[in-house]
Image (cartoon, helix red, strand yellow):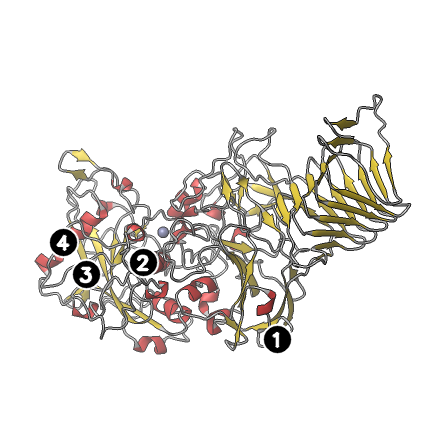
Amino acid sequence: MKNLLLIFLCFPIFINGQSLSPWFYEDNHPYCYDSLNTSKTYDYVPNGLQFTPKDNFKGLIIFVNFQGSYSNAPNSITVNGWNHDNVDLSKNYISTVQSDGTALDYFYSNNSQFAQYANNPNVKNISKFYHEMSMQQFYFTSEVYKRNNQVFSVSIDPTDANSWYNLNYKVMQKILSDDSSFNWAPYDNRKNNPYYDFDNTDTITNPPDSIPDYIVFIYKYNAAIGNHLYSNGLTPTNMNTWSGSGGGLASASLSSPINFNGYSFDGCGYTHCLGEASLVGLFIHEVAHNIYGSPHYSGANTVSGAYFFPENGWSMMNLGFGAFSSALGWERWYLDWIDIKSNNQTIFSNIFTSTDLTANGEYILSDFITTGDVVRIKIPNGTGRNQYLWLENHQGVSIFDSRFAINNGDDEPFSPSPRGLVAYIDAINDDKSNTYIFDAGAGGIKYLDSQGKYDYSWDSIYSSPNHLWGNRIYNYHIDNNNPISGQMPCNAIMSNYNYDTVITKVFYTNSTPVDDEAYWLIKRDGTYTDDMLQSNINFPVGSRLGISSSPMLVNYPNYSSTTFQGTYFINGISVEVLEQYSDGRIKIKVRFNDIDVTQNLRWCGKIELNDITENTNPDIIITTNKTLTIDKSGTPNRHTLYNDQFINPTIFSCLNNSYFKMNNTSFVNVDNGSTLSLKSGSKYEVNSGAILRIRSGSTLVIEQGSQLLINDGGQVIIEGTGKLDYQGGTITLNGSNAKLEIAGNLTIAANKTFTFSGSGYVKFSSTASSANNITANAGSA
Ligand SMILES: [Zn+2]
């Protein structure tokens, strides 16, 4: 996705912060690596890392420009939103900042404005964002640095600088020399850096510390400023290579200490290096790093972490191009802004098992942003990180229920944000006392798009039109439904675009990859569909997210270079959207053990069936007249080649105590080199009129201790190119018309006797000219 990273930086016009997602900015996060005090006995995420996101909090924004003493002076370089012709940038650098320092497009400067502008649709600023997301618990205001009651841009000489922290130091030194009586007191109301240890809104126990609480340095800088800055007067240092130059730094550190009339500075705040970056988007992104050591997810910095498919979506990490410019329910819960409740915050809806359900499993979700209603359901993920399905109802009541990105590069409007029930899976963190998530949580939000999961193909000729600001766009086509292993429209589509022997992929990291072979889904069948913007991800009334849907409600496995795409665990949990009331509330029903396959489906990947019901009842039922095809995926699930493709074969395993039942006249086809494996302790039942077919190059494995039960009128057919791998296990042919037909190969493991019980029959029907279709290993019979 290198093109997106680069090209969004060239976004032509920035209007009122409605432009970019920080997601396209490379940023750096030294704070997240700060070694926390290991002697602590108590960590609580909502206390915050740099500050506690509650109550009154006031920051200071300092605008900075560079002295134009160079032939190639930074001030001569265009930075969108900054007037580069005006050497004195005191009024014009950010067009929406008033001369008196009011910056209503970004912040309130005093608490009375929270009520004053609460219902003003033209004010969509950072203060209002935190106020709404925190359920009116957080009052974050900010002022702009001024002199003589006028906004003032601090002008520094960057000569010899070699880092942004070095420039921050120069800025503070300049203020000290030119404005030595500056009063810091209004910006020091708390004790800094709780490090999750204490609530720093408690200023009685933890009084202010003569260190300003939050400082943001915003530089008139763009990437065109290059290597004309010199370190030590000798060694050129290209400013573009400084940490943070692609966007911001999640710290406002100074390279050396400064004593400013008794005040000192500890880095609380952030450095907004790229002047034209969206202040709102980048600010909220950096603050997320500052308050909970946030990893990158939802497309931020194009990080996909331990997962194969890159993802785009809404969150505090990415306000610009997801469905909404709202926080996630997970984020609001993680910071103690909401409880996991529904029915207008009256019913707990934090569901781990079926015993947590309400009597009828029903919940009513009111508007997510304004009431905080959410439902969270734990879904099985083997031994991997805990994963949860989150459900939110987005009714568009708040102005933050629309995305910041309004128009595409052709200056036409994107389709509007979705309305109704939306769903995503969180694998970031469920433990507020386990604070370090920066690496393991990366990429840990997976949005479910009701449009489905598919195998995609693409035309080899791409374009780079204005529509996506010159980003590379491929024309995609939907090939097949692939509800487990396919990609969703809001994923970037992974593929081997350069026709070499590897899909370039950076995984298990939280740092910005610049060359992943993945492109966003913008165009399908010749038409701009802008799928990545999630305009149609909502689940409408009548839909049921579960075992029979596409996407299936299933975990997101990790990806590694050795195990490739991990295991999908079928779970039997479903969510049905029952009804939407006229006031926008949505009623849903949550079920466990909802294991009926009621659609014709194609499943691919590494799939496990476990003892979902935890009793002797079936754990999956293929219902009458429905066909399940266990097939090879058409979507890459590995980045290296295997048999000339980037796809591992499909393996469907029935594990100990699982029970796979084919109802009368249902069908299961195992196709295209796939394996259906009956593990020890599993049971597979074929009823009358039902047929299990093992097709082209595929295998049925019957392990020792497993049970294959074919009832009267049921059939298992190993077709000519299929194989039955018999490793022991019980085969029961229950009735004279119960049939196991082997036209393909039968392999009998060493020391095993291939036999069956019951009154049915085994038919060997190979038409091969030389009858060599039975392989009997040593000691077998
Ligand atoms: Zn970041």
Q: For the residue carrying disc 2, how many other residues have a C-alpha within 10 Å: few (<14), some (14-19), or many (20+)?
A: many
- Which dot marks residue 581? 1
Tell me the quarter of the picture where residue 184 sits: bottom left
Report which residue position mark 2 lands on: 290
Q: Tell me the residue at 76%/43% (across/down).
A: 730
- Residue 257 has which mark? 4
Residue 494 is tagged as none
Q: Residue at x 58, y 61 (%)?
A: 538
Between the C-alphas of marks 3 and 4, the distance is: 23 Å
Label 4: state its secondary structure: loop
Q: Position of residue 585 (x, y in %)?
A: 57, 74
- Which class describes the residues within 10 Å of circle 4: few (<14), some (14-19), or many (20+)? few
Amino acid of disc 2: Asn
Question: Of marks 1 and 4, which one's residue comes earlier in the chain?
Answer: 4
Whole-angstrom CA distance, mark 1 to mark 2, is 39 Å
Relative horizontal placement of residue 460, taking residue 29 as reference (left or right): right
Sequence-first disc among 1 and 3 = 3
Name the element at disc 3: loop
Q: From what the image shows, is residue 111 above or below residue 671?
A: below
- The residue identified by callout 3 is 152
Q: Is residue 530 visible?
A: no
Direction from residue 746 to residue 496 in the image, left or right: left
Camera-side mark, 2 or 3: 2
Q: Residues within 10 Å of mark 3 (few under 14, many from 20)?
A: many
